[in-house]
Amino acid sequence: MGFKRSIKPQTFMRTSVKVHKLTTEDAMNYILTIKNKFLRHPEKFHAFIHTMIDFSRGRINTHTVIDRVKILFDGYPDLLLAFNKFLAKRHKCNLMKNFV
């Protein structure tokens, strides 16, 4: 008499990771962080704001925004990391490749 072993397929449970959906308040807090960081260099803050305005009006694309932000925030990896949160997944590595 042989015994049959019941082999059940291994099931994988997705781990629940709570993802914070970014809000307008998050964006405003980030802008205030930039403004405070560049109190002595307001031209950098204004350049960032104008970049965002150009993007929102369709004058520039995401790649141009990333290029400009990399230049503006050179030496400020904390600002780049925070900006990265606002980018679509496919663009994140473009922003961070020099900092990882």
Image: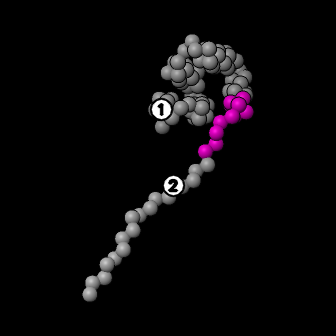
Q: Which residue is painted at 58% across and 14% down in the image?
A: 58
Mark 2 surroundings within 10 Å by alpha-carbon count, few (fewer than 14), some (14 through 19), many (20 or more) = few
Q: Which quadrant of the figure has residue 1?
A: bottom left
Q: Which residue is mark 2?
A: 14
**42 horizontally vs 84: left or right:** right
Q: Which residue is painted at 46% across and 59% down in the image?
A: 12
Q: Single out the residue that lies furthest toward the left.
A: 1
Mark 1 surroundings within 10 Å by alpha-carbon count, few (fewer than 14), some (14 through 19), many (20 or more) = few
Considering depth in this image, is 46 or 28 the residue closer to the camera? 28
Secondary structure at badge 1 equals: helix
**Type of amino acid at the residue the image marks with label 1:** Arg
Q: Which quadrant of the figure has residue 65?
A: top right
Considering depth in this image, is 27 or 38 the residue closer to the camera? 27
Considering depth in this image, is 27 or 18 the residue closer to the camera? 18
**29 horizontally vs 85: left or right:** right
Q: Is residue 6 above or below residue 43?
A: below
Q: Is residue 1 visible?
A: yes
User: Which segment is the magenta one?
Assistant: 19-30
Q: Which mark is residue 50?
A: none
Secondary structure at badge 2 equals: loop
Q: Which residue is painted at 62% across and 14% down in the image?
A: 57
**23 horizontally vs 58: left or right:** right
Residue 78 within the segment the image draws in magenta: no
Q: Position of residue 54 (x, y in %)?
A: 61, 14
**Type of amino acid at the residue the image marks with label 2:** Arg
Q: Which mark is residue 90?
A: 1
Q: Is residue 77 visible?
A: no
Q: Position of residue 25 (x, y in %)?
A: 73, 33
Q: CA distance from mark 1 to mark 2?
A: 22 Å
Q: Is residue 84 above or below residue 41?
A: below
Residue 24 within the segment the image draws in magenta: yes
Q: Position of residue 78 (x, y in %)?
A: 60, 34
